[in-house]
Amino acid sequence: MNGPSKKIPIPASLTATYLQTQEEQLEVEHKKGKLFIGIPKESTFQEHRIALVPSSVNALTNQGHRVLLENDAGLKSNFTDHDYSEAGATIAYSKEEVYKSDILIKVAPPTLEEIDLMRPNQILLSPLHLPALTRELLAKLKAKRVIGIAIEYIQDDAGSFPVVRSMSEMAGLSVMLTAAELLAKSKGVLLAGISGVPPAKVVILGAGVVAEFAARTAIGLGAEIRIFDNNIYKLMRLQNHLGQKLYTSSFDPVVLAYEIAHADVVIGAVHSKTGRSPVIVTESMVQKMKPGSVIIDASIDQGGCFETSQITTHDNPTFVQHGVIHYCIPNISSKVAQTASQALSNILTPLLMQAHHAGGIENLMYTSYGLRHGVYVYKGSLTNPHLGKRFQISSTDIDLLMTSNL
């Protein structure tokens, strides 16, 4: 039989407030921050796009944000300085003035000269273009202690890459039309077949968005297509989206080598979520292709999926190696600059609006994994492990760096 329980006396001072009215604890709202956004004029890669169109600038300035635009920055997208000034932007007539902004938004990677104009804690939103990235450029960005965010690596809540998807839709449509033109010029071959003459054979590497829109265009033109990807779910989804059975295969080395050797056009459309695109086609495979065949590497902005790929420009879009025409432009969508600018603006404007409610882009980074995923340099530290491995530079996880700054 248990003995009498012993009660531990609790001081009245600890229990006296149990039944008293308590203070309401509400979530503290971030102070809405006014953003100071700078949009410089691009001078590399024959870049014709602009990050924000006048309607987006109008929406931002109506919220009290300041947008500073370098003169004629939107001209190649058919937007005039007058369009922007009417939307509330301030027109700057020197690049130095634009680079005083807190947030810089570019559609081409920064040059070494542009990095010289930056300052610590400044936020840079721009593409990376991995093949053009150098150790010197990374070192300068680190030395300037800026926060560099690669827009092509920003993820949305669903885990997809909105900038990549939007630009990929345009790239997929464009590459097949470009391939038809190059094939006609090099071999006098019509991409589509006619009565009594078989169509050209097109091989597409990857089953993502570029592949889907390239395949849709190729089918519309009447070409014979082959699609390769190691993700069977993607291949199934692609067939469902296109509404018909297609020739699909995993990256079987024997099958792939055979199809590439007999192809008239090969489209590289392989995207990496973290770093460089994998090399799918070796130089020896390119050597076995038919003379006058066409390679279009839509993955070149991530390094390319052909071993023979090298960056080309809109002024000089192609080169010939082993008798095969290579088209390797990293900003394919710049050919349709106004449409591409509108698409970019539709993605970046809501992001900036979210930053407004969070109290700034850096505050938004604390709550948005998708935005943090795009950060590659943070206040003097490299945060992208792929770049660290490529350039033999130590990298630090962005979550650790941001936690240490709390």
Image: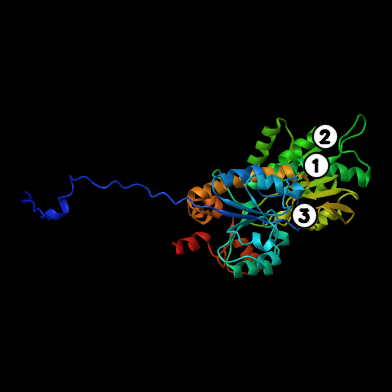
Query: What number of labels is visible?
Result: 3
Q: Amino acid at mark 3?
A: Phe
> Residue beneath label 2, please?
221
Determine whether label 2 and label 1 are within 8 Å by CB: yes
- Kindly state the secondary structure of the residue where label 1 is placed: helix
Pointer 2 or 1: first along the chain: 1
Q: Provide residue 265's location: percent of width, then percent of height.
A: 83, 45
Would residue 250 be visible to someone looking at this image? no
Q: Amino acid at mark 1?
A: Met
Could you tell whether 235 is left or right of 354 in the image? right
- Kindly state the secondary structure of the residue where label 2 is placed: helix
Q: Amino acid at mark 2?
A: Leu
Could you tell whether 123 is left or right of 91 in the image? left
Pointer 1 or 3: first along the chain: 1
Q: Quadrant of the C terminus?
A: bottom left
Pointer 3 or 2: first along the chain: 2
Q: Nearer the viewer, residue 80 or 116?
A: 80
> Residue beneath label 3, please?
306
The residues bearing labels 3 and 2 have C-alpha atoms spaced at a distance of 25 Å
Q: Nearer the viewer, residue 116 or 99?
A: 99
Could you tell whether 46 is left or right of 39 in the image? right
Q: Residues within 10 Å of mark 2 (few under 14, many from 20)?
A: some
The residues bearing labels 2 and 1 have C-alpha atoms spaced at a distance of 9 Å
- Kindly state the secondary structure of the residue where label 3 is placed: loop
Q: Nearer the viewer, residue 20 or 214?
A: 20
Q: Nearer the viewer, residue 102 or 390?
A: 102
Q: Residues within 10 Å of mark 3 (few under 14, many from 20)?
A: many
> Residue beneath label 1, please?
176
For the point 62% across and 61% down, the residue is 386
Q: How has the structure been colored for display?
A: rainbow
Q: Provide residue 268's location: percent of width, then percent of height.
A: 75, 49
